[in-house]
Image: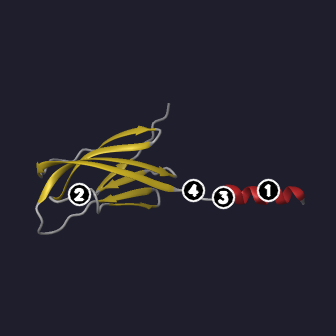
Amino acid sequence: MRYLLFILCGGLLFSCSDSFINHKLDFEKKGVCSDQPRTVKMLSNINGERYLFPVCMDEDFNGKGYTVERKGDSILVNFPKTTGKKQVSFDLVLDIDAKPRYGHIVLDGTDVTVVPYYR
């Protein structure tokens, strides 16, 4: 009976969820939007992943108004675009640290498969 109580308490303790998504965005306005294919560079370290990529957004983008959310095994990142507003190109640096690990990230419509680095 004592062992059953110990196993039950241990199971409850380890079943607690501590999932999170931390993100930070740095951006630099570049100029006119182009139709060139968008490349996404990814750097991994112990604090998560860093994504470097260009995106066309509203000219008055101030680093707010973008969304980061988890959907199953994916993280979805969307940036504001208003019809009728002038669109300009921005170079973005997005740092994402999430638990549990994710297998895909969708950066404003571009699906990127995340392959963690193993030594």
Q: Residue at x 66, y 58 (%)?
A: 15
What label sits on residue 59 in the rendered view? none
Nearest to viewer (mark 2 / mark 4): 2
Mark 3 surroundings within 10 Å by alpha-carbon count, few (fewer than 14), some (14 through 19), many (20 or more): few
Nearest to viewer (mark 2 / mark 3): 2
Real-space Cα distance between discs 1 and 3?
12 Å
What label sits on residue 7 in the rendered view? 1
Q: Residue at x 20, y 64 (%)?
A: 81
Quarter of the rendering containing residue 41: top left
Nearest to viewer (mark 4 / mark 1): 4
Real-space Cα distance between discs 2 and 3?
40 Å
Q: Which residue is mark 3?
A: 15
Q: Which residue is mark 4?
A: 18
Q: Residue at x 90, y 60 (%)?
A: 1
Mark 4 surroundings within 10 Å by alpha-carbon count, few (fewer than 14), some (14 through 19), many (20 or more): few
Q: Position of residue 97 (x, y in %)?
A: 44, 48
Q: Position of residue 9 (x, y in %)?
A: 77, 59
Real-space Cα distance between discs 2 and 4?
31 Å
Q: Position of residue 68 (x, y in %)?
A: 37, 59
Task: Please tell me whether mark 4 sits on a helix, a strand or a loop.
Answer: loop
Q: Position of residue 56 (x, y in %)?
A: 18, 55
Pointer 1 or 2: first along the chain: 1
